[in-house]
Image (spheres, grey):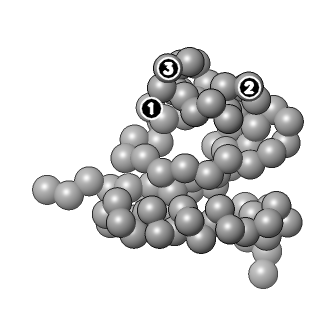
Amino acid sequence: MSKTWYVYLLRCSDNSLYTGITTDINLRLNQHNNCNKLGSKYTRARRPVKLVYNEIHENRSAASKRECQLKRLNKKQKEQLITHLP
């Protein structure tokens, strides 16, 4: 049985955007907001964070590739993705 993978964007308290992947989006959001050991170093200093976008992928490889694509986007392009503008 394969796991569902998610690519997600978080809006940080300084209005920056963080991109990541996970198999449990609720757990990961909780870690980013509450756990100094499991949350990322980037989001630790920018709490609270809020989930603003996510996509479902069938495996880790597909999620990782999409994560890389999203990380290459500039902030304006990410904002357009979040609001579903062309």
Q: Is residue 3 left or right of residue 47?
A: left
Write down the residue under mark 1: 27
Amino acid beneath label 3: Lys
Residue 83 visible in the snapshot: no
Q: Is residue 81 left or right of residue 70?
A: right
Percent across and percent down for residue 37 are 50, 20
Percent across and percent down for residue 62 are 39, 69
- Residue at point 51%, 68% (across, down): 66
Percent across and percent down for residue 35 are 53, 19
Q: Is residue 44 above or below residue 71?
A: above
Amino acid beneath label 1: Leu
Q: Is residue 66 above or below residue 33?
A: below
Q: Secondary structure at mark 2?
A: loop
Frontmost of labels 2 and 1 is 2
Q: Is residue 4 left or right of residue 8?
A: left
- Residue at point 40%, 41% (across, down): 24
**Count of numbered marks:** 3
Disc marking residue 37? 3
Residue 38 visible in the snapshot: yes
Q: Residue furthest front?
A: 41
Write down the residue under mark 2: 45
Q: Secondary structure at mark 1?
A: helix
Rounded to the nearest angstrom, the CA distance separating label 1 from label 3 is 14 Å
